[in-house]
Image (cartoon, rainbow, N blue to C red):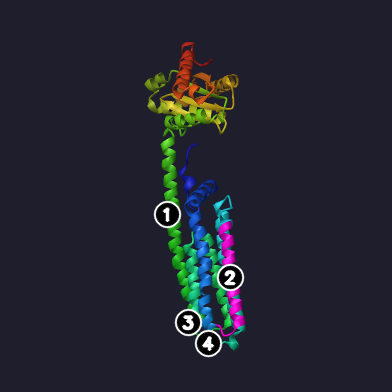
């Protein structure tokens, strides 16, 4: 369970290269950003619809105004549906994909509105200025960057909006008016570039902060030398097992490396550290992912097995003892361990349950019993 800093390398698209870490970050973002995302989607829809006020001024016929209002109403419906659906996805990256599709849908409705406007241009008393189209697209581009999303989603959506808008204007609206189509493309492109750089830095900073928190969290619950859980974390997990009963029956193993002091005294602490690390690696490779393995202190380790009784616990303890005995630990050579194994005693109610302290005391006594019996053995109740 050791952490490598390679897990937290951020790729060129401003995402963790490790998919598991990126998934964890998305879950973290979901808890902090989902509510805001849903609100901003609605704000986007109603803001777009509010421009219907300007339609009364620019549009010259009732039919043209009706089409515009219908399209703006459609945007409200789209954003409302999207806001409700955003909370239904288990994965937040799917929610963010929905946000991107919603933004593109709003843009396409706006393009339909422009197209309908161009069809009625001959009956209009005053044409919509190019600056109005430019400002509308600028606001939409800024909105795409403002709504929390993945950096690559924001960039793709805005590049699509810019490209499609310029092509549409050149084909259906012409290049008359001020600013010109070239000027619009240049200014909108600069806006996208600046926003992309800013959002990239923000997203990168958020992931670095998340990575730092994860590393600190890991360091607080693990042993610095072996990389397995520390005593504090183990006691916390054991208390949960005692409380919730989901892992009943369960067994606790406590083992001590035999003659470890002699290794330190004769070969030095570096060799002793190698023995501790090697032993931890051997045991880690022989237990299940759901089993809890921790360094209790010094050369003592504990293993918590869920869903097994003392008979199976004794068998597992023997396997671990044999696995350690069969391995060579560098300068120290062959090492052995003495193991105590006990099963938790569940009472008729929570008040009569065995306490954590008594449970640990029992397994400690069994471990010393194995020591007194000649070491390199398992002692059970």
The answer to whether marks 2 and 3 mark residues whose Cβ atoms lie closer than 8 Å is no
Q: How far across and how far down the image is residue 289, in percent?
A: 56, 34
**Is residue 187 one of those drawn in magenta?**
no
Q: Which residues are magenta?
A: 59-84
Q: Quickly name the residue at label 2.
A: 73
**Total number of numbered discs in the rendering:** 4
Please provide percent x and percent y for residue 250.
55, 25
- Which residue position holds label 3? 179
Which tag, 2 or 1, sits closer to the chain's start?
Answer: 2
Q: For marks 2 and 3, give the CA distance.
A: 29 Å
Q: Which numbered disc covers residue 126? A: 4
Local packing at callout 2 (Cα closer than 10 Å; few below 14, some 14-19, many 20+) is: some
Badge 1 density bin: few <14, some 14–19, many ≥20, Cα 10 Å = few
Q: Is residue 136 above or below residue 245?
A: below
User: Which label lies toward us, 4 or 3?
Assistant: 4
Residue placed under numbered mark 1 in the picture: 205
How far is disc 4 from disc 3 in space, using C-alphas?
17 Å
């Amino acid at each position: 369970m050791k952490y490598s800093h390679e897990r937290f390398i951020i790729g060129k698209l401003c995402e963790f290269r490790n998919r598991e870490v990126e998934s964890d970050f998305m879950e973290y973002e979901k808890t902090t950003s989902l509510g805001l995302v849903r609100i901003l989607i609605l704000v986007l829809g109603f803001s777009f619809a509010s421009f219907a006020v300007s339609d009364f001024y620019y549009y010259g016929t009732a039919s043209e105004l009706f089409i515009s209002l219908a399209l703006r109403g459609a945007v409200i419906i789209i954003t409302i549906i999207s806001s409700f659906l955003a909370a239904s996805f288990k994965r937040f990256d799917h929610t963010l994909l929905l946000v991107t599709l919603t933004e593109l849908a709003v843009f396409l409705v706006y393009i339909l509105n422009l197209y309908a406007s161009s069809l009625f241009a001959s009956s209009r008393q005053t044409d919509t200025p190019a600056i109005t189209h430019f400002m509308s697209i600028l606001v939409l581009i800024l909105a795409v960057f403002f709504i929390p999303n993945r950096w690559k989603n924001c960039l793709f959506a805005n590049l699509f909006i810019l490209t499609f808008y310029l092509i549409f204007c050149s084909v259906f609206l012409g290049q008359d008016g001020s600013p010109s189509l070239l000027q619009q493309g240049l200014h909108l492109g600069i806006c996208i570039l600046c926003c992309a750089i800013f959002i990239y830095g923000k997203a990168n900073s958020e992931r670095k902060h998340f990575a730092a928190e994860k590393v600190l969290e890991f360091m607080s619950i693990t042993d610095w030398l072996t990389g397995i859980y520390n005593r504090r974390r183990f006691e916390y997990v054991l208390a949960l097992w005692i409380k919730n009963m989901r892992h009943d029956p369960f067994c606790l193993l406590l083992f001590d490396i035999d003659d470890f002091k002699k290794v330190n005294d004769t070969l030095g602490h570096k060799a002793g550290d190698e023995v501790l690390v090697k032993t931890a690696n051997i045991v880690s490779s022989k237990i299940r992912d759901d089993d809890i393995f921790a360094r209790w202190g010094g050369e003592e380790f504990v293993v918590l097995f869920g869903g097994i009784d003392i008979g199976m616990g004794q068998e597992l303890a023997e396997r671990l003892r044999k696995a350690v005995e069969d391995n060579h630990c560098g300068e120290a050579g062959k090492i052995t361990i003495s193991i105590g194994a006990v099963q938790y005693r569940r009472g008729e109610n929570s008040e009569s349950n065995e306490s954590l302290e008594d449970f640990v005391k029992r397994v400690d006594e069994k471990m010393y019993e194995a020591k007194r019996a000649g070491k390199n053995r398992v002692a059970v109740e």
